[in-house]
Amino acid sequence: MKVLFVADVDGKPGRRALKEALPALARTHGADCIIVNGENAAGGVGITADTYHEIVAAGARVVTLGNHTFDKRGTEELLDQEPWLLRPANYPPGTPGRGWLKVSVAGVRLLVVNMLGRALMGLAADCPFRAMDAILADEAGQADAVFVDFHAEATSEKKAMFHYLDGRVAAVVGTHTHVQTADLEISARGTASITDVGMTGPRHSVIGVDPQVALERFLSQRPVRFETAAGPWQLDAVAITIEEGKATSADVIHLVEASDR
Ligand code: FE2
């Protein structure tokens, strides 16, 4: 089974990248299942029904979220309505929606988990390590492979999670920092990991934000409303082959819009 995971879709340029490039990319890689992180899909923060459906229309089977899950009005209802939309599993008990689900991919039961880091995130999520233990115990014997989107700021917390889950899941990919890291690997125990898959959004930006606006905040030290940059897109992703619950090959993908090459 080949899983194509697309990093944080940011605003209109990100959604345009999916529409223009994802179907062909999925064909090229022979993807059986596409997972997309959509937590910045609506204007850079959060997701709406319309932006969720745009992501699904481009080919996503599962959409994951992160620290901006509830930034847009209506996300509680959207989570109730859309079974393939995940929010981080370690939000407090009673939070609307779900943090993990199983999809059947070519007869294989793939467990997809969305988890939020705690270091430097400004959110008091439950312990992601213990939350992973609980999910894996709950699903023991009921899933053939596990894919984790660990949405976290600190590289140290992400690396720690890779070691924690080594040999227990097929893949654990980092998201949130929007810059693709050069450390994609498969461990001896068959777990693929990468600290950050990157961003699918405006290429000429400060992690998605208009550079002028981001600079104004840095230079003035005053709160400035962030705006998603316009212009050409980039699409960041990883393609991971999973056989008998273990990762057997992994590739990073960094595409840029043709007009901007
Ligand atoms: Fe994030």
Image (cartoon, helix red, strand yellow):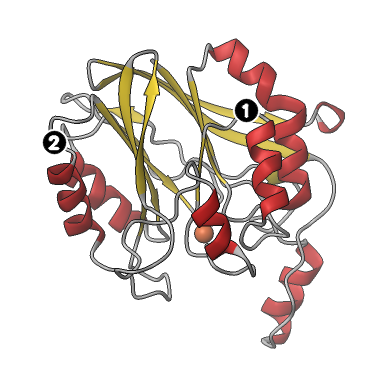
Q: Is residue 28 left or right of residue 189?
A: right
Q: Is residue 96 visible?
A: yes
Determine whether, in the image, residue 1 is placed left or right of residue 61: left
Label located before the other in sequence (2 or 1): 1
Q: Is residue 119 left or right of residue 187?
A: right
Quadrant including the N terminus = top left
In the rendering, at what x and y percent does residue 212 appear? Answer: 81, 67
Circle 2 crowding by C-alpha within 10 Å: few under 14, some 14–19, many from 20: few
Q: Amino acid at mark 2?
A: Ala
Q: Quadrant of residue 95?
A: bottom left
Label 1 crowd bin: few (<14), some (14–19), many (20+), radius 10 Å: some
Question: Label 2 to label 1, Cα distance in Å?
Answer: 29 Å
Residue type pointed to by label 1: Gly
User: Which disc number belongs to residue 86?
Assistant: none
Q: Residue at x 39, y 13 (%)?
A: 106
Q: Mark 2 = which residue?
A: 140
Per the image, label 2 sits on a secondary structure element best described as: loop
Q: Residue furthest front?
A: 81
Residue at 50% over, 53% down: 65
Which disc is residue 59 wearing?
A: 1
The structure residue drawn at horizontal position 13% and vertical position 36%, both measured from the top left corner, is: 140
Residue 226 drawn above or below residue 211: below
**Residue 155 x/y as whole percent:** 36, 54
Q: Quadrant of residue 22?
A: top right
The residue at label 1 has a CB less than 8 Å from ligand 1? no
Identify the residue at horizontal 25%, vertical 43% (top origin).
162
* x and y, in percent, of residue 178 in the image: 56, 50
**Label 1 element class:** loop
Using the image, determine if residue 115 lies above or below residue 71.
above
Disc 2, ligand 1: is the CB inside 8 Å?
A: no
